[in-house]
Amino acid sequence: MTLLFLFLGLVSLTIVAGALTLFVLYFFRDPDRRADVQEKDVLTPADGRVVGVWNLESGENALGTRAVKVSVFMSLFDVHVNRIPAGGRISRISYRPGAFFAANLDKASEKNEQNAVFLDTRGGSRIVFVQIAGLIARRIACWVGEGDEVQAGQRFGLIRFGSRVDVYLPEGSRVVVQPGHNVKAGKTILGYLP
């Protein structure tokens, strides 16, 4: 009888370990994506669900001017590799430590740990995209540096286990996604620059 319990325990442990391994492999998947984009196209930088689109006044956002903010929440089941929304040059990167509220809440944009990437596009516009850590995600990875020339759809970072990316577009940009839309990083058009 003891051998039977030992055997059942080992089988159970093997099943749990196998399930965890499969989940980690699934979570860190990184599908190859190619998008045919024009100069004014802005791709979504994250897989997930659009949780908000806001028009902001000067001083209320990372651009410092009137802007449109689009927030994408990444659940545990979305791809967490982040991609560059438009081609251009990285002019600044700004990391800020913070709290770890649930990333689907509005206050996550203001309070949570985050990494802001400032991009000067080839067309002369400035876009800011902000990686925001969530309740479980406590690690933001950014693989680009200031001065780097980047392409739309290029991988630039990763946020682990449920997080958010906010994108700030200049006033006059036309956003084509709405709250509730499911989007794919480097594939879905988020909007168009002025």
Image (cartoon, rainbow, N blue to C red):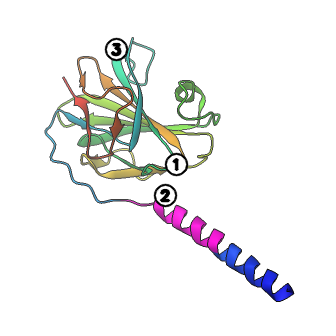
Chief secondary structure of the magenta portion? helix
Kindly indicate whether the residue at mark 1 contacts the one at mark 2 (C-beta within 8 angstroms). Answer: yes
SS at mark 3?
A: loop
Q: How far apart are marks 2 and 1 (CA)?
A: 7 Å
Residue 124 counted in the magenta span? no
Q: Which residue lies furthest to the front in this view?
A: 1
For badge 1, the amino acid type reads: Leu
The magenta span reads: 15-30
Q: Please state the horizontal and vertical placement of residue 192, each as a whole percent of the image.
A: 20, 29
Residue receiving disc 3: 66
For badge 2, the amino acid type reads: Phe
Could you say which disc has been placed on residue 40 in the image? Answer: none
Binning the other alpha carbons within 10 Å of mark 3 as few (below 14), some (14 to 19) or many (20 upward) gives some
SS at mark 1?
A: loop
| Residue at the image point whose x is 32% and y is 31% from the top | 127
| Residue at the image point whose x is 49% and y is 57% from the top | 27
In the image, taking residue 183 as reference, residue 134 lies left or right, namely right
Could you say which disc has been placed on residue 27 in the image? Answer: 2
Is label 3 or label 1 in front?
1
| Quadrant position of the N terminus in the picture | bottom right
As displayed, is residue 100 above or below residue 110?
A: below
Q: Please state the horizontal and vertical placement of residue 134, each as a whole percent of the image.
A: 58, 39
As displayed, is residue 140 above or below residue 43?
A: below
For badge 3, the amino acid type reads: Arg
155 or 150, nearer to the observer = 155
Residue receiving disc 1: 76
Kindly indicate whether the residue at mark 1 contacts the one at mark 3 (C-beta within 8 angstroms). Answer: no
In the image, taking residue 183 as reference, residue 15 lies left or right, namely right
Q: Which residue lies furthest to the right in this view?
A: 2
Q: Please state the horizontal and vertical placement of residue 149, each as a whole percent of the image.
A: 27, 48
Q: How far apart are marks 3 and 1 (CA)?
A: 32 Å
Binning the other alpha carbons within 10 Å of mark 1 as few (below 14), some (14 to 19) or many (20 upward) gives some
